[in-house]
Image: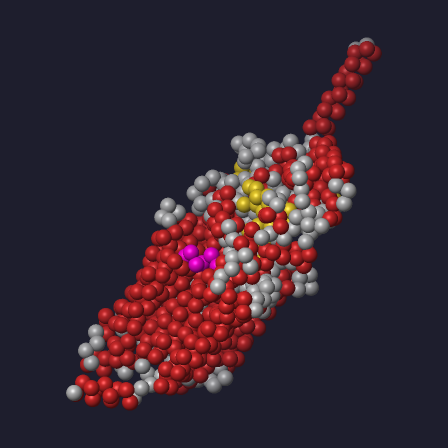
């Protein structure tokens, strides 16, 4: 062979070697509060251990997980909450409940990454045997924080930055239009037949604090996630009250009676048509949820006549 | 003439002591009721309560609270307490067992399981059928407990049979709630024995059964008095013991099934009240029933008040308070009576 | 000279120790051992991950030659779970035999002496009311201690005026009710995030059992189970009545607390490993009694075998029937065992 042919052979050899190394899965180290895990750079099959936050966020980032936890309703198909109505979930495999997902089904999917929430840390040992398992700090950190970790994990930080941009713009708009947001009080709750709980779905709590809105004193003194008697509703009176319902549970019909009561009608928010009531599955606890909730508040507070107590 | 003489005789032995006891209890219930109406998220003074009940002004928000929510809750507590107490008296009488109680014997769990199953599997039957399912469940549980415990008057065996039945039905309820996780949210509050304003709706469904059952209780008084002296003596006096036991059980099923349908399983009331009543009156079941009715209502109102006040501003379920009160009483009874 | 009837066997496990056993008892023991092994094999080869019987056999006996991911399914997911199930079932069955014999009541179960309720309540206290005080590794031990403490209380209350099985049982019921109400209160009104974590520990942790826990359980079981079996003569006599037992030299005040202690250790170690399973302690002894009545020398091992079979069965059914939804073994057992139990009990009384 002359030199020319040797050069060509050399280049072909080099290119061949490069493509060969690219085919082996590249791994890197991901670290967060729950430890260090060696994860693939571009995971192909991700299993999510929570439907209402992680699965939704993955879909929003343009990544289709291959398996996810869901809620089971008797003999009907499992429902991937907050995802089914927005994305095509065909091919998404149900892997069990969030408290005890089925490791064998997860094994069958041969995932290369498993993501879970803070209280699923106990499952990490077993699931690590199947694939690298990452626990995200969904309790201690805000949605923006753990969503950014998740985006980093799946290599979609660009898409996450887009979402973050949009969210920041809405907050910016709000602050521009409302110079003194702390003068507006908001209450987020869930009313049931006999009691209510202080819960903010779809990242509402985070949006409210980012916008600088404040809470009524009754709300600040109270505890989240605990049943309160309906009588205490007047302690939670605010400029705007936001409630959510779960269509599968009929809560909307069950609570109609309460919304006809004198106590309810005397609330400031109700008298001024500033009571919002929407379907819980509309937004998940994800960046999309933050954006949606932010638009909601932006619209109702700045885009129409809004009355405040002060 | 003779009739007049007879009437005169009965008037001499008029039970003034017992009657005044009833009046006192009634007074206590009324006072407790006012107290119940006044306490809550906001303490409302008694004058406002009186006005709300008699000269209602819908614009006053305090009065609105009384009329709209607290009144309903009070009514439910009264009825539930009375029904549970009566069920306990009958249960203890026909099983000749001082430790009988619908909660301990699994009757409440059986009724609860059937209600949960009907809500999850047969939602096409409307809410009107809820009490029927509760009765079915209570009846099945009673039948199984009787089967396990046998006709011997062995109190230990009866209680253990009840424990086994409770375990069985609770486990089955838990499985149902696992397979249908959406149902869990709705039923969890009810399953721990909660009394709330919304229960008035359910109470309306159950009223007719309760009224009929209570009337029938009083109809059984004569037979129960005879049975108290012993089964053989009762037979001698012309009482059909088998019929008594079956109708007694039937009444217990209706009474406790109704309570479960309205407020979920609440235990220990049926255990404690008959003993308290027996401390005040002894023999005649008419007085025992009356006293138990009032004491049951009183106990439940006071428990409800405690449930709302102890961990203010959180309200715990009344079923939990009755367990905390009733279990020590149960233990004390065991220590004193079992040698 | 030896005057045993023909159907008795003489066994000499050690020199100078002779056991007399009915050949029928030995036959049943062998039968049920085979049954247990078959059930274990069935459990190892069944699951959401479909592996053919042939391949499963190879994986169990020659794991080196099979692909990693299949070996993992059987060796890391299924086998520890099966062994834990078998050990806990056996432990609870023995605890059940002890309790039923010392209270002379066919309806007694290990849950009566408050161990389970105590363990749950302790777990909830340390996870919901004062979290972060105890590191996660020590929580099962705390649960065991809590269960033990409750059992001691019940024992102390019931035997003030001398031992009475009736009082023991009834006071157990009372205290268990109180503890259940307390646990319910914590679950409903505690900080929801702490409660979620606590419930993961409490509810059917057969799902997350590790080989380490299996080893620990094995130690508890072997030690307490053997000690319990060694008391078979005393148990034989206790069943006949206090006075009969006393006349034959069984000292109530020493033997009964000791047996109760064994029962508590067996139950609490089982609860710490696998959560709530007590129906096993109720039914397994009954089933065993149909084969060897009250001869505790055979009754104890036989109940252990049957208890093990039952829990393995329950666990395997629980994870396959509604796959991938997992039902805890304890609940499945109740569903399956309840009708049988009721029929069994009603037939028992008629004889």
Instruction: Judge left or right: residue B281 versus residue C143.
Output: left
**Where B262 falls versus C10 (above or below)?**
above
Question: Residue placed at 69% from the left, 28% from the top?
Answer: A23
The magenta span reads: B194-202
Q: Nearer the viewer, residue C17 or A247?
A: A247
Q: Is residue B296 left or right of residue A49?
A: left
Q: Residue at x 57, y 44 (%)?
A: A277
Depth check, front residue: C26 or A262: A262
Q: Nearer the viewer, residue B193 or C80?
A: B193
Percent from the top left, x then y, of residue A91? 53, 32
Residue sitting at 33 percent across and 83 percent down? B283
Q: Is residue B198 magenta?
A: yes
Q: Quadrant of residue C268?
A: bottom right
Q: Which percent across, then down, holds residue C21?
A: 38, 69
Left or right of residue C159, residue C237 in this image: left
At 53% from the left edge and 73% from the top edge, which residue is drawn?
C151
Question: Is residue A242 depicted above or below B34 in this figure?
Answer: above
Outermost residue on the right side: it is A3
């Amino acid at each position: 062979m002359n030199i020319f042919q040797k050069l060509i052979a050399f280049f072909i050899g080099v290119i061949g070697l490069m493509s060969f190394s690219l085919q082996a899965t590249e791994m890197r180290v991901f670290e967060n509060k729950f430890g260090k895990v060696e994860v693939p750079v571009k995971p192909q099959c991700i299993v999510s251990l929570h439907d209402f936050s992680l699965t939704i966020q993955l879909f929003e980032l343009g990544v289709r997980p291959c398996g996810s936890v869901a809620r089971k309703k008797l003999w009907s198909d499992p429902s991937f909450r907050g995802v089914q109505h927005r994305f095509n979930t065909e091919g998404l495999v149900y892997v069990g409940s969030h408290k005890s997902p089925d490791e064998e089904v997860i094994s069958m999917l041969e995932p290369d990454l498993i993501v879970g929430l803070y209280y699923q840390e106990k499952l990490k040992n077993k699931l690590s045997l199947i694939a690298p398992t990452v626990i995200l700090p969904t309790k201690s950190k805000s949605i923006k924080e753990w969503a950014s970790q998740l985006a980093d994990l799946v290599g979609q930080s660009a898409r996450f930055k887009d979402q973050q941009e949009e969210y920041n713009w809405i907050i910016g708009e709000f602050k521009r239009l409302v110079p003194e947001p702390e003068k507006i009080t908001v209450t987020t709750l869930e009313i049931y037949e006999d009691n209510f709980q202080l819960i903010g779905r779809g990242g509402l709590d985070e949006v409210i604090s980012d916008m600088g809105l404040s809470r009524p004193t009754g709300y600040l003194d109270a505890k989240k996630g605990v049943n309160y008697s309906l009588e205490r509703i007047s302690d939670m009176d605010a400029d705007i009250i936001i409630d959510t319902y779960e269509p599968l549970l009929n809560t909307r019909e069950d609570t109609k009676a309460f919304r006809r009561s004198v106590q309810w009608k005397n609330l400031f928010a109700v008298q001024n048509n500033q009571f919002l009531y929407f379907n819980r599955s509309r937004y998940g606890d994800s960046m999309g949820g933050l954006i949606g909730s932010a638009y909601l508040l932006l619209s109702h507070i700045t885009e129409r006549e809004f009355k405040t107590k002060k | 003439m003779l009739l007049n003489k007879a009437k005169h005789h009965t008037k001499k032995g008029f039970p003034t002591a017992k009657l005044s006891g009833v009046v006192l209890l009634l007074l206590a219930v009324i006072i407790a009721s006012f107290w119940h109406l006044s306490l809550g998220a906001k303490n409302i003074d008694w004058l406002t309560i009186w006005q709300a009940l008699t000269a209602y002004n819908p614009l006053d928000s305090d009065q609105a609270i009384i009329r709209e929510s607290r009144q309903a809750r009070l009514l439910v507590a009264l009825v539930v307490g009375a029904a549970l107490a009566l069920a306990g008296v009958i249960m203890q009488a026909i099983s000749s067992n001082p430790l009988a109680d619908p909660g301990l014997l699994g009757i409440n769990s059986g009724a609860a399981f059937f209600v949960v199953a009907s809500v999850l599997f047969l939602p096409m039957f409307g809410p009107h059928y809820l009490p029927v399912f509760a009765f079915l469940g209570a009846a099945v549980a009673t039948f199984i407990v009787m089967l396990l415990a046998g006709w011997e008057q062995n109190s230990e065996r009866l209680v253990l049979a009840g424990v086994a039945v409770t375990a069985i039905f609770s486990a089955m309820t838990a499985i149902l709630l696992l397979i249908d996780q959406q149902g869990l949210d709705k039923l969890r509050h009810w399953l721990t024995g909660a009394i709330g304003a919304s229960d008035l709706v359910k109470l309306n469904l159950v009223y007719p059964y309760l009224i009929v059952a209570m009337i029938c209780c009083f109809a059984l008084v004569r037979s129960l008095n005879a049975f108290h002296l012993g089964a053989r003596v009762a037979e001698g006096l012309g009482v059909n013991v088998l019929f008594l036991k079956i109708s007694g059980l039937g009444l217990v099923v209706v009474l406790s099934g109704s309570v479960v349908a309205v407020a979920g399983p609440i235990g220990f009331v049926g255990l404690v009240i008959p003993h308290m009543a027996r401390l005040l009156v002894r023999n005649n079941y008419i007085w025992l029933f009356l006293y138990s009715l009032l004491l049951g209502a009183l106990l439940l109102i006071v428990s409800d008040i405690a449930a709302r006040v102890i961990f203010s501003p959180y309200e715990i379920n009344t079923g939990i308070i009755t367990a905390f009160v009733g279990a020590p009483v149960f233990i004390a009874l065991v220590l004193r009576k079992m040698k | 000279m030896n005057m045993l009837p023909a159907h008795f066997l003489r066994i000499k496990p050690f020199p100078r120790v002779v056991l007399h056993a009915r050949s029928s008892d030995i036959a049943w023991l062998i039968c049920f051992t085979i049954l247990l092994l078959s059930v274990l094999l069935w459990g190892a080869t069944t699951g959401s991950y479909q592996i053919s019987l042939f391949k499963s056999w190879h994986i169990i006996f020659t794991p080196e030659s099979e692909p990693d991911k299949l070996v993992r399914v059987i060796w890391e997911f299924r086998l520890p779970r099966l062994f834990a199930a078998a050990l806990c079932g056996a432990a609870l069955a023995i605890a059940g035999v002890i309790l039923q014999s010392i209270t002379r009541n066919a309806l007694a179960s290990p849950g009566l002496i408050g161990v389970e309720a105590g363990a749950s309540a302790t777990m909830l206290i340390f996870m919901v009311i004062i979290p972060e005080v105890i590191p996660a590794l020590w929580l099962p031990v705390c649960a065991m201690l809590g269960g033990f403490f409750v059992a001691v209380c019940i024992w102390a209350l019931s035997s003030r005026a001398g031992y009475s099985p009736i009082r023991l049982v009834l006071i157990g019921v009372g205290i268990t009710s109180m503890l259940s109400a307390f646990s319910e209160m914590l679950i409903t009104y505690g900080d929801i995030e702490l409660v979620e974590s606590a419930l993961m520990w409490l509810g059917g942790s057969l799902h997350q059992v590790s080989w380490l826990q299996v080893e620990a359980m094995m130690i508890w079981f072997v030690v307490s189970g053997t000690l319990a079996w060694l008391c078979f003569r005393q148990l034989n006599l206790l069943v006949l009545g206090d006075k009969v037992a006393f006349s034959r030299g069984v000292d109530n005040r020493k033997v009964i607390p000791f047996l109760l202690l064994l029962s508590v250790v067996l139950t609490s170690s089982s609860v710490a490993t696998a959560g709530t399973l007590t129906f096993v302690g109720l039914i397994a002894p009954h089933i065993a009694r149909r084969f060897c009545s009250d001869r505790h020398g055979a009754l104890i091992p036989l109940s252990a075998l049957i208890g093990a079979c039952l829990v393995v069965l329950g666990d395997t059914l629980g994870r396959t029937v509604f796959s991938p939804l997992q039902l805890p073994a304890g609940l499945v057992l109740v569903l399956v065992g309840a009708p049988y139990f009721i029929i069994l009990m009603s037939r028992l009384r008629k004889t």
